[in-house]
């Protein structure tokens, strides 16, 4: 029934002719259920559901885009103008997908177009997407079918649709090893990219502050916990509170927040340059090259801000009264240990980028393609919960792979502050940990690290959405 209603309402739609106007009027009248000459978000949402075309957030975005007088509704002129402009953009997208210019799109053309956008799907996955638009079951999609499927869907080009699968998502879990954010050419030519970076940095700052006690406990356990001196969650918190009071749980958080902005900016700029070096002119970067560019950008950013990482560890582990602040800490490290102290643990940190970013990206791509294979019936848009789930799982897997290197890095950063006369190398420190604590000694502190993932992801996503609204990226 839904399919018949959709076809009856949309099949006559053509741009810039009398039939189109009548079709738009008929559609508008059906959506305007209270007959007040306007369609609001609730009416549009109900209409999309009735036609079996509901997508989360679509009604709000259509009204926000077409609402020229900012009254929160669409009158018929606004509705018609939106549909005509949207249909023209859809036509350009359809032509770009129709690679052999025969007026129809087949599965191989979808597969090829997705591959150029960095989304590699199997032939079966491409057929699944095709079938979601194929009304007459010919295994081909013509312009009428394509237009009907996307006319009341606010994303008009394939890149915008696939952008829902953008890798990094702004999930700040306190780690600095992820693949950087990506922006389309349209975003980069406007002010959207820097607004998104600002929104992401603010989200990261709030997220890290909210989960700082768990982060400090992780570092505390990485450095002080052993087989002979087991520190649990409750015991660790108790020791820190007894030593420095409740506020001591946030030690090191100031510089942890402060380093977000320079690291994000350096990583983004470096990533763009590495992508240009690795990709051919005019072509989309492939997944493996994106991983290489992301890893190199992460290494560049880490090299630039690594002294702040060392300061963060020292400030996190400091005893009450040991340092007056970050500048006092930096001054004392420089005077006692020299410049080289600011790069203690640099090699394991750099090596950790590869397993973290590689596994993070590989797991994300696998989960993404699995979702497309089994659930891409209406569109390639998976929705927020699926994206957050994929991002959280992939980031957690990346952490699991790189955690031993992160532990070694933290131990090396902290050694001078623990008055250890011998400063062992990365390999000797690994051997010592394995000899004294066994394999699981390399995962000291991972429980509070995992505990902070879900709240960190949730906080960063919510703050990011509010920041985007505040900065005018979304309405």
Image (cartoon, rainbow, N blue to C red):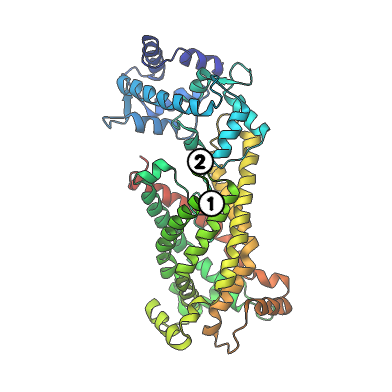
Using a 10 Å C-alpha cutoff, classify the residue at mark 1 as few (fewer than 14 neighbours), some (14 to 19) or many (20 or more).
Answer: some
Q: Is residue 172 visible?
A: yes
**Residue 329 vs residue 284, the one in the foreground:** 284
- Give the quarter of the image for residue 360: bottom right
Where residue 185 is drawn, which disc sits there?
none
Mark 2 surroundings: few (<14), some (14-19) or many (≥20) residues within 10 A: some
Q: How many marks?
A: 2
Which residue corresponds to mark 2? 164
Q: Relative to 427, does residue 458 appear above or below in the rendering? A: above
Q: Of the residues tagged 2 and 1, which is closer to the observer? A: 1
Q: Percent x, y for residue 233? A: 59, 69
The furthest residue to the left: 69
Is residue 181 shown above or below 227?
A: above
Figure quadrant of residue 226: bottom right
At a point 59% along the width and 51% down the height, the residue shown is 361
Which tag, 2 or 1, sits closer to the chain's start?
2
Residue 278: mark in rendering: 1
Q: Toward the viewer: 159 or 286?
A: 286
């Amino acid at each position: 029934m839904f399919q018949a209603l959709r076809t009856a309402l949309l099949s006559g739609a053509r741009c810039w002719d009398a039939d189109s106007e009548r079709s738009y009027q008929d559609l508008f009248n059906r959506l305007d259920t209270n007959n007040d000459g306007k369609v609001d978000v609730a009416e549009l949402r109900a209409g999309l559901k009735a036609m079996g075309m509901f997508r989360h957030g679509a009604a709000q975005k259509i009204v926000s885009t077409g609402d020229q007088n900012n009254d929160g509704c669409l009158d018929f002129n606004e509705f018609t103008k939106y549909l005509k402009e949207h249909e023209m953009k859809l036509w350009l997208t359809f032509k770009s997908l129709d690679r052999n210019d025969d007026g129809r799109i087949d599965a191989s053309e979808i597969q090829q177009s997705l591959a150029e956008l960095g989304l590699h799907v199997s032939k079966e996955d491409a057929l699944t997407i095709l079938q979601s638009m194929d009304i007459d079951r010919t295994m081909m999609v013509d312009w009428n079918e394509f237009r009907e499927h996307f006319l009341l869907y606010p994303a008009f080009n394939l890149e915008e649709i696939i952008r829902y699968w953008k890798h990094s998502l702004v999930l700040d879990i306190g780690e600095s090893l992820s693949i950087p954010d990506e922006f389309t050419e349209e975003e980069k030519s406007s002010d959207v990219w820097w607004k998104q970076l600002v929104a992401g940095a603010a989200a990261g700052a709030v997220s890290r502050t909210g989960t700082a006690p768990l982060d400090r406990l992780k570092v505390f356990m990485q450095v002080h916990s052993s087989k002979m001196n087991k520190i649990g969650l409750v015991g660790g918190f108790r020791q820190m509170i007894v030593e420095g009071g409740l506020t001591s749980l946030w030690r090191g958080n100031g510089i942890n927040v402060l380093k977000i902005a320079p690291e994000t900016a350096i990583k983004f700029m470096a990533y763009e340059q590495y992508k240009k070096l690795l990709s051919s002119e005019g072509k989309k970067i492939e997944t493996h090259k994106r991983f290489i560019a992301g890893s190199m950008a992460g290494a560049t950013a880490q090299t630039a801000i690594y002294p702040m990482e060392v300061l963060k560890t020292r400030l996190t582990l400091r005893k009450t009264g040991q340092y007056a602040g970050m500048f006092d800490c930096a001054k004392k490290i420089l005077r006692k240990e020299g410049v080289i102290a600011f790069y203690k643990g640099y090699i394991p940190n750099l090596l950790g980028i590869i397993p973290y970013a590689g596994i993070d990206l590989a797991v994300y791509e696998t989960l993404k393609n699995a979702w497309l294979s089994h659930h891409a019936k209406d569109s390639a848009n998976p929705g927020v919960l699926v994206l957050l789930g994929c991002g959280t799982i992939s980031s957690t897997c990346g952490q699991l792979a790189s955690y031993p290197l992160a532990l070694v890095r933290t131990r090396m950063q902290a050694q001078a502050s623990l008055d250890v006369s011998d400063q062992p190398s990365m390999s000797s420190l690994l051997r010592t940990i394995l000899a004294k604590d066994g394999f699981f000694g390399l995962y000291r502190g991972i429980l509070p690290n995992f505990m902070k993932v879900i709240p960190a992801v949730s906080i960063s996503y919510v703050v990011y959405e509010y920041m985007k609204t505040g900065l005018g990226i979304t309405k």
